[in-house]
Amino acid sequence: MVKITDVARRAGVSPSTVSYALSGKRPISDATRRRVQAAVRELGYRAGPAGRPASGRRSKVLALAVPMRSGIHVPVVTEFAVSVVTAARAHDHDVLLLTQGEGEEGIGRVAETGLADAVIVTDVQLHDPRLPLLRSRSLPSVLVGVPAEPDGLTCVDLDFRAAGELCVDHLARLGHRVVALVGSPPEVYVRRTAFARRLVEGFTAAADRHGLASAVHPCGTGRDAARSIAERLLRELPALTGVVVHNEPLVEPLIEALEHLGLRVPGDLSLTAVCPAPVAASARVPVTSVSVPSAELGTRAVHLLVRKLAGAAVPQRTLLPPRLTERASTAPRGA
């Protein structure tokens, strides 16, 4: 069976470009269109949902696109995936896991062959290369994340911008005047991953609103990275008393690194985090945090897809409000 991805490979273009060239939904250059048409003729490709069950029946399968890229925290992804499988089974659906790095080819294959009735897309970038394909196909989809231009898409996520603001608001109420964000690994920002970028926006906006001095530092994971960022923060921001961490694996190593440098949490420095609640609660100093509701996001995504498959209207954007839980890691400045 010839797939759209085979045509794309032969023509030297993306699957979404093949779809546009054949459907006419977007303008494509004459040269590109001729190249695609030549590949179609050579390979004998037939557009359409080949392989879909007969008589209009559905496959009762949902696809879950989880690109396993560097900088992704696997335990969070695992919790999310388990919640998707559990919710899908409650609606009598199985789940097909797509982990190929680029994502586009896997989604194109599912759309062409009818392997799944719908797809959940994760690790969404602000300008995600998978979006043209999702917009051009009849395969229903839900994005866990909000791209820069969400028109025509169904998105669900934690309101990460509000989460960044909430952490800074909490530190400002405690009297902290110099704050820093220890963020996700650098490659997450290079990819322009939506949730990380939006949290930076919220952190910066709240710091400016309160008149705080602030800095943003992407950071890797592990003890070496924690020691390096702790030393850099103290070197560049000697008056620092408040930190927001958006890097789940770094929470415990960062507290350890700060203590090694002679700083007490929260006596000398208050620390908040945006991370799963168990990570925050189990740290050597329980951390004030905004919880990342991975399980709820997975369940919401499945429910939205099921409603779309039933022909029901769904909201374009669903943002879960952040909730901050105070623990032992924050205190008034100077306390």
Image (cartoon, rainbow, N blue to C red):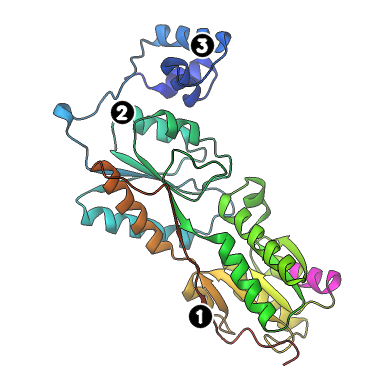
Q: Give the residue displayed 25% in from the left and 48% down from the top.
A: 94
Q: Which mark is residue 250?
A: none
The part of the image, by quadrant, that contains residue 111 is: top left
**Residue 149: x and y, percent?**
54, 41
SS at badge 1: helix
Which amino acid is tagged 2? Answer: Thr
**Mark 2, other Cα within 10 Å: few <14 / some 14–19 / many ≥20:** some
Which amino acid is tagged 1? Answer: Ala
Q: Earlier in the sequence, mark 1 or mark 3?
A: 3
Which amino acid is tagged 3? Answer: Arg
**Residue 30: x and y, percent?**
56, 8
Q: Can you see residue 224?
A: no
Q: Give the residue displayed 47% in from the left and 25% down from the top.
A: 15
Dividing the image into 4 quarters, which one contains the C terminus?
Answer: bottom right
Give, as a single range, the part of the protein colored magenta: 229-237
> From mark 2 to mark 3, how far is it between C-alphas?
23 Å
Q: Name the residue that disc number 1 marks.
A: 281
Q: Name the residue that disc number 3 marks.
A: 33
**Mark 1, other Cα within 10 Å: few <14 / some 14–19 / many ≥20:** some
Front one among 60 and 203: 203
> From mark 1 to mark 3, how far is it between C-alphas?
56 Å
**Mark 3, other Cα within 10 Å: few <14 / some 14–19 / many ≥20:** some
Q: Earlier in the sequence, mark 2 or mark 3?
A: 3
